[in-house]
Image (cartoon, grey):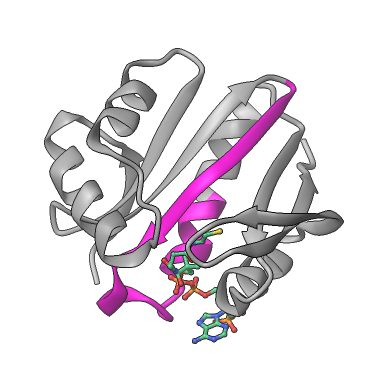
Amino acid sequence: MSLEFRFANQQDLNTIVEIENASMSSPWTLDSYKEALDSDHAFIMVADEAGVCVGFAVFYLTAPESELPDIVVSESYRGRGIGKLLLDASLRELSLRGVDTVFLEVRVSNERARALYEKMGFEEIGRRKYFYSDPIEDAICMRLEIDS
Ligand SMILES: CC(C)(COP(=O)(O)OP(=O)(O)OC[C@H]1O[C@@H](n2cnc3c(N)ncnc32)[C@H](O)[C@@H]1OP(=O)(O)O)[C@@H](O)C(=O)NCCC(=O)NCCS
């Protein structure tokens, strides 16, 4: 595997939308990713396997805080450590940008994502009732303090 981590560019957007659509029940639109790409207060980190985007993570920045609203690894690439490496690379970037705390929400039933976040050191700080639709489900709110 020749894996590298870099910022997304315009050429990645169609692949990002394809990966998102194949994985999420309420997927983000192309415009949402364009907005994140163009914003000074967001970045999209890409896992690049031989020139092809195989996973990505979107971060919103309001330093010293950040939010992780969307992370997906393409289905056939899951379970190989890419999600963890993608978060490692993103956390290094966040730290450089003066972020010390990251927040996210995750579906209660999403055991794979919860296991990944816990492994990265995220801690549960609360729950939001009926936060998700399609299907309706509670969210677990998590927080990570980044060591600088
Ligand atoms: C969540 C997601 C990004 C994880 O990516 P990934 O590349 O598969 O994750 P990794 O291979 O780095 O695994 C990291 C940890 O997650 C957990 N994990 C991985 N595969 C798992 C599985 N099949 N079942 C349970 N836990 C699993 C393990 O704790 C693993 O660590 P380990 O391998 O050291 O035991 C990926 O599963 C995904 O894209 N899911 C669909 C989209 C999604 O749900 N996004 C999150 C929304 S909040």
**Which residue is at the front of the view, 148 or 142?**
142
The answer to whether residue 116 is above or below residue 61 is below
Residue 68 against residue 10 in the figure, above or below: below
Residue 13 x, y percent position in the rendering: 19, 39
Magenta-span inclusion, residue 30: no
Going 47% across and 62% down the picture, which residue do you hit? 134
Which residue is found at the position 54% from the left and 53% from the top?
Answer: 87
Q: Is residue 144 left or right of residue 137?
A: right
Examine the rendering and report whether any part of residue 123 can be seen.
yes
Q: Give the range drawn in magenta.
A: 64-88
Q: Position of residue 117 (x, y in %)?
A: 66, 63
Q: Residue at x 46, y 73 (%)?
A: 81
Asked if the stretch drawn in magenta spans residue 69, the answer is: yes
User: Which quarter of the figure is the N terminus placed in?
Assistant: bottom left
Q: Please state the horizontal and vertical placement of residue 67, each as a whole percent of the image.
A: 63, 36
Image quadrant containing the C terminus: top right
The residue lying at 35 percent from left, 43 percent from top is 28
Q: Is residue 97 in view from this perspective?
A: no
The residue lying toward the viewer, choosing from 125 and 53, is 125
Drawn side of residue 124 relative to residue 55, left or right: right
Q: In this view, does 75 lie above or below 32?
A: below
